[in-house]
Image: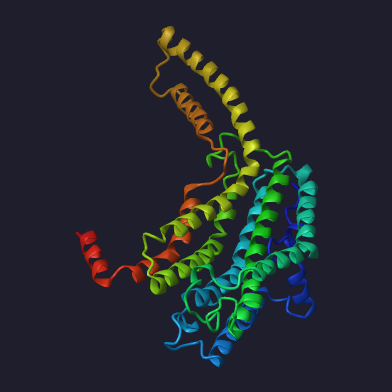
Amino acid sequence: MVETKSSALDNFSLTRGGALDWLLVRLGHGEDVPHLLVRKTLFAVLITWLPLFVLSLVQGRALGQDITIPFLRDFAVNVRFLIALPILILAESGIDQKWRILTLNFLTSKLVADADVPVFQKLLEKTSRLRDRALPELLLLLAAFLPSLFVKTELLMSGISNWHTIGTGASALSMAGWWFNYVSVPFFRFLLLRWIWRLFLGTLLLWRVSRMRLYLVATHSDMAAGLGFLSQGQEAFSPIVFAGGTVIASQVANAIAYQGATLSSMKFPMIAYAVIAIILLVSPLLVVSPVLYKIKKKALLEYGALVAEHNQQFDQKWIQNKPSSNEVILGSNDPCSLIDLGSSFLVVRQMGIVPVDKPTLMSLTLAAALPMVPVMFLAIPVNQLLQLGLKLLG
């Protein structure tokens, strides 16, 4: 057996790498990962949220009755930079650990033959080199900044006085509005885009591995020929889905609290986000679908022929021909083999070609929906909530 531990496996990471991490390492902040994540989170909050608070306070836009949405009463900005942004950073450790375990599982479960382990290691190294390139993150940074040149304020806050602007002109940004538009939001967009980039890296790795000679068995009880564990890798992204959900929910909360919107009128963006998030997280698993389809198609023919032959022999022995007097069906192994083989064929028929399970779908759905719960409390009067609760209790 080839040793499953290797430098490629030990050093493989879906999140640690790239130009930003390289810079942190050069500055001496790349040794202790848990402490590094905490420092990165504090640094991110200090350059995104704190300047907004200070600048809005200086210009009298933090509190007061002069404007409809002062800074400290803006659900969207505070949730985005005090809740969603920390989650986007702190989630790195858990997701990275989960993907490392899943990667190792290709070897421990013998999906990759011992002779093909060097090829598998080269694929990991290839993915790591792509992750560490500076150009992708520079392009992400550019993509994160470009929208700020055309959009000067939050879309759901246009036409209403808020801390982003001064005076009546939408283009007259306050100092806090300027920092929000050109520093805070691009930084947040960059973190989101970098997660999409990491998701692409994971998808590319799965596609490359699926092209290897994997030992996949159609009768595997995970209903995915042995690749059912890949669903856990996508489930690990639930914190990212939750973070995005808090951003959507907080903007909806602003619309309800300050612009007279109703929960029913804002249900489309909430539902649309949940659907898009689930599709985005499940679609990477489609790269292994062609392989699973071929395996299922082949297994249906092979196991179908085997079941037919076995059932014909059983029929000849126990139904068509009278068995000898010293043979009785009670206690015979023949019915057991008939049931076992039939069960195996049933597994092949029920085998899916997308290795995603119900717990993963439920986890992603829950992560997208949970941030909407506080919005319901904001939109629905307390007495109605109490009445609804009493009805549910019977």
Residue 346 drawn at (x, y percent): 49, 30
Answer with left or right where residue 286 lies relative to residue 349.
right
Observer-nearest of 307 and 12: 12
Q: Is residue 363 above or below residue 333?
A: below
Is residue 196 something that shows in the picture?
A: yes
Is residue 6 something that shows in the picture?
A: no
The quadrant of the image that shows the C terminus is bottom left
Observer-nearest of 19 and 317: 19
Splitting the image into 4 quarters, where does residue 18 fall?
Answer: bottom right
Q: Residue at x 54, y 38 (%)?
A: 352
The residue lying furthest to the left in this view is: 394
Q: Residue at x 61, y 85 (%)?
A: 175
Observer-nearest of 276 and 89: 276
The residue lying furthest to the top in this view is: 321
Residue 377 drawn at (x, y percent): 34, 70
Splitting the image into 4 quarters, where does residue 270 fall?
Answer: bottom left
Q: How is the image coloured?
A: rainbow
Answer with left or right where residue 376 lies relative to residue 348.
left
The residue lying furthest to the front in this view is: 168
Q: Residue at x 50, y 57 (%)?
A: 273
Q: Residue at x 24, y 59 (%)?
A: 392
Residue 123 drawn at (x, y percent): 77, 50
Answer with left or right where residue 64 lies relative to residue 291.
left
Q: Is residue 308 above or below residue 244?
A: above
Observer-nearest of 182 and 104: 182
Residue 239 drawn at (x, y percent): 54, 64
